Image: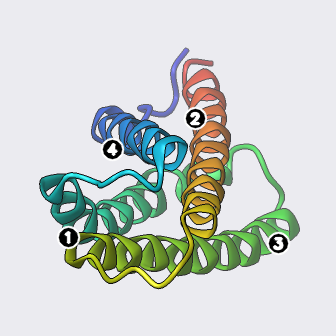
């Protein structure tokens, strides 16, 4: 018998899909640097990455944090909250660096080497892919427990 209505994760899943697609674009750009990056891509990444990340984190907080009480103890929740805040801060800083790099690439004034820029992009995209994978697993567990 279902005692709890599972959260609707559809909007969060769409945000994950969009961010994963952007990670694919970042990876392709990193692979081909020092080639010229299309100005429209630079504009898109420079203006939309941070808002997407912020919306994703807001949805995670709303949809996943409450569900964590189903699978963790109070003590574990406190530790998880600290790790979540630290991770978000680091990811936001990395996203801001990526945004700044795209602004510089757009204007042709990037002071980082192509290798350093590619490393920055790959570091961010690997972090995001790992983040999304772990959150998708939490969504799966919450949905499974909600079905019990």
Task: State the residue position of label 3.
Answer: 79
Position of 47 with respect to 84 (left or right) is: left
Cα–Cα span, label 2 and label 4: 12 Å
Residue 47: mark in rendering: 1
SS state under label 1: helix
Q: Is mark 2 on a helix, strand or loop?
A: helix
Q: Are marks 3 and 1 in contact (CB under 8 Å)?
A: no
**Which quarter of the rendering shows the N terminus?**
top right
Whether the residues at callouts 2 and 1 have beta carbons within 8 Å, the answer is no
4 or 3: tag closer to the N-terminus: 4
In primary-sequence order, the first of circles 2 and 4 is 4
In this view, 2 is above or below 97: above
Q: Nearer the viewer, residue 84 or 98?
A: 98
Q: Mark 2 points at which residue?
A: 136
Q: How far apart are marks 4 and 3 (CA)?
A: 26 Å
The residue identified by callout 4 is 15
Q: What element carries label 3?
A: helix
Q: Which of 111 and 65 is in front in this view?
A: 111
Q: Nearer the viewer, residue 9 or 133?
A: 133
Q: Distance between the residues labelled 3 and 1?
A: 33 Å
Q: Which residue is drawn at 58% across and 72% down?
A: 88
Residue at 58 percent across and 80 percent down: it is 89
Question: What colour-coding does the image apply?
Answer: rainbow
């Amino acid at each position: 018998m279902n005692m709890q209505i599972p959260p609707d994760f559809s909007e969060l899943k769409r945000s994950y899909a969009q961010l994963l697609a952007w990670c694919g674009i970042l990876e392709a750009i990193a692979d081909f640097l020092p080639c010229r990056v299309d100005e429209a891509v630079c504009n898109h990444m420079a203006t939309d990455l941070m808002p997407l990340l912020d919306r994703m984190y807001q949805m995670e907080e709303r949809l996943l944090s409450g569900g964590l009480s189903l699978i963790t103890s109070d003590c574990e929740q406190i530790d998880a909250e600290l790790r979540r805040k630290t991770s978000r801060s680091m990811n936001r800083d990395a996203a801001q660096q990526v945004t700044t790099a795209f602004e510089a690439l757009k204007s042709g004034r990037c002071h980082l080497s192509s290798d350093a820029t590619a490393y920055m992009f790959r570091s961010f995209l690997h972090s995001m892919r790992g983040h999304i994978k772990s959150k998708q697993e939490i969504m799966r567990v919450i949905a499974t427990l909600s079905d019990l």
